[in-house]
Every structure is written in C-alpha cells, then in structure tokens.
Amino acid sequence: MIIIAGKLYVDAAARDAYLAGCSKVIEQARAAPGCLDFALSADLIEPNRINVYERWDTDEDLERFRGAGPEPEQAAQIRDAAVSRYRISGVEAP
C-alpha cells in the first residue's frame, strides 16, 4: 500500500477557491482503480495550509492516475509543499 501525505501552502485568501477547484480531481481519484482514499482539506490552524492524504493499492495505480501532476493553473497557486510517499507493509486495527 502507498500513502501520499503532507501539506501544500497557497495564499490564505485563495485557499477555499483552490480546494473548490480540486473537487473534480478528488472525485476522479476516488473512482480510479486502486484508489483506497483521497482527501484534500483546509487546515484548522494555518489559514494558508492544505492537508494532503492519499492511499493507493500499488505504485502502478498511483502513477496511472497521477500522470503529469496538477493542472498548471493549480500548480501556479502552490507557494510551498512538503509531501512524501510512504510504503506500508501492513495494516492493523488500532
């Protein structure tokens, strides 16, 4: 299993519009083969931060969906990012 997690930073005044513009991508991701979860959310503390969480079955599923990355208009709005890929070998109940 692959988890993509981290944070994006955009202008605080544009964060809600940025997230609204991502709704179609989120719907597409959740419908994509191998997508187990996909979420982008406004951070409750930092007004310019967006939290990223994706869970994929395989690298191939992730790469098939991801393609070239965010649309140029979305990419231009990102001021900073810290996102990592995690490989998970097992999952247990808490």
Image (cartoon, helix red, strand yellow):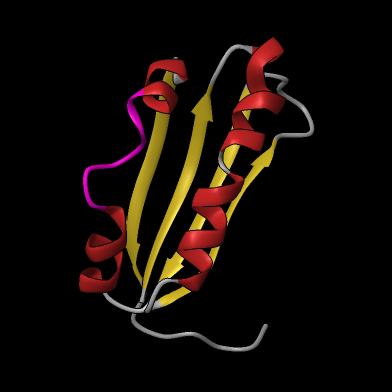
Q: Main secondary structure of the magenta part?
A: loop
Up-down relation of residue 84 to residue 37 (above or below): above
Q: Nearer the viewer, residue 27 or 45?
A: 27
Up-down relation of residue 25 to residue 82 (above or below): below
- Write the residue at 59% across / 41% down: 51
- Write the residue at 41% across / 71% down: 32
Residue 30 placement, left or right of 3: right
- Write the residue at 77% across / 27% down: 45
Where is residue 21? Give x, y as percent.
59, 35
Q: Quadrant of the C terminus?
A: bottom right
Quarter where residue 10 is shown: top right
Quarter where residue 46 is shown: top right
Q: Nearer the viewer, residue 29 or 44?
A: 29
Where is residue 70? Give x, y as percent.
36, 37
Q: Quadrant of the N terminus?
A: bottom left
Up-down relation of residue 70 to residue 46 (above or below): below
Q: Which residues are magenta?
A: 67-72
Please give the count of numbered marks on the rendered protein: 0
Residue 62 placement, left or right of 27: left
Residue 18 placement, left or right of 7: right
